[in-house]
Image (cartoon, helix red, strand yellow):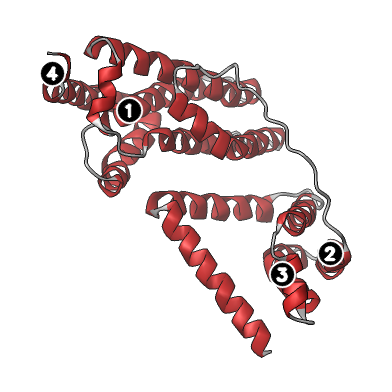
Amino acid sequence: MEILSIYLQLRLKQLARLLVGVGLLRSLLLFGATVFTFYLLVKTENRWIAPIMAIVGLMFYHNERRDKAFLLLQTQSATTLFRIEYLLIGLPFILIEALKGHFLEASAVVVTALLLPQLKSVRWKTPTFPLPFLYKGGLEYLRMFRLYGWIYLVLLLLTFLGALHGNVQVGKVALIGWGVIQSMAYSLVSQRQMLANFLNYATFQKHLLRSVLWNVAVTCIPLIAIVLCFSFDWGSVLFSLSAMLGCLLYLWNMGMLRFQLSSSVAIAFYQLFVLIPLFFFSCFVPFLLIPFVLINGVCYLILKNTTRQLWN
């Protein structure tokens, strides 16, 4: 039990360091996405979705963890530690299935958690896939998509599953969530001297707008297409257009903001209290896009005035 206590304390410390490294805003987004995912799992009528997600997730985690050999050398209870950890990770899925009365599916997750430590890891080379559909000028966006592209695929899948069950609201939530996630491309502070790489201020704005416009369109259109295919009405069309325009304004503002604010913390607070609420409500109230445009216009003029000396 002492070894188990030490191991769990170590895991909690690692989780705390991970959350600190990820940052407050991203941690809140991940927490919200987790809560929303479990809500969908509770509401879904398909019995196989939750256990399959749990089993695949546990198998992937066991296969990719790097401390198995170390723990096996350090303690004879390593296998027991693995089983307890996997049971704790799978506990929410087990409870979901048990509360629904799906005891066979819950038992499958338990058996998987108990048998996984006996399996050997499978190593494979992960190929690097080019992303030709993303505008090559937006290198920050390319980096963001390689980090969070899996979230986009999950949102796309959830949108499709929700639409199949007659709930297009899932797609609308996914569209808003992806709009916020895309802002991670411009969440780091950049030195104004980097703007000197452009011929002038107009060239920088053209580069930024072209990159943002293309990436927003390419990634949002599949989500919008699913929503409109299963619910083609004036409300869905208006929401989709408002969400795309709001996302465009959001990312354009972030692309300028990173050259104006001096810390990532300030950018995070600005997003939480200004951009995210404005983006969210503008998706449902299109008239709020007008103040969004005005805010971007002010940022445009301020950045132009403060960087004038770079091209003199």
Q: Identify the secondary structure beneath mark 3.
A: helix
Q: Secondary structure at mark 1?
A: helix
Cα–Cα gap, marks 3 and 1: 44 Å
Local packing at callout 1 (Cα closer than 10 Å; few below 14, some 14-19, many 20+) is many
Q: Nearer the viewer, residue 309 or 294?
A: 309
Q: Position of residue 106 (x, y in %)?
A: 81, 65
Amino acid of disc 3: Phe
Provide residue 32's location: percent of width, then percent of height. 49, 52
Residue 255 circle label: 1
Query: On the rendered structure, is 175 left or right of 79?
Result: left
**Residue designated by label 4:** 308
Badge nearest the viewer, 3 or 1: 3
Left or right side of 98 for 149: left
Kind of residue sitting beneath label 4: Arg
Q: Residue 47, which numbered label?
A: none
Q: Are marks 1 and 4 in contact (CB under 8 Å)?
A: no
- The tag earlier along the polypeptide, 2 or 3, is 3
Amino acid type of the residue tagged 2 in the rendering: Leu
Does 261 sit above or below residue 104?
above
Which of the two discs, 4 and 3, labels the residue nearer the N terminus?
Answer: 3
Residue bearing mark 2? 116
Q: Which residue is mark 3?
A: 70
> Separation of disc 1 and disc 4 at Cα?
17 Å
Q: CA distance from mark 4 to mark 2?
A: 61 Å
Three-letter amino acid code at the position of disc 1: Gly
**Alpha-carbon span between mark 2 and mark 3:** 17 Å
- Mark 1 vs mark 4, foreground winner is 4
Give the foreground label among 2 and 3. 3
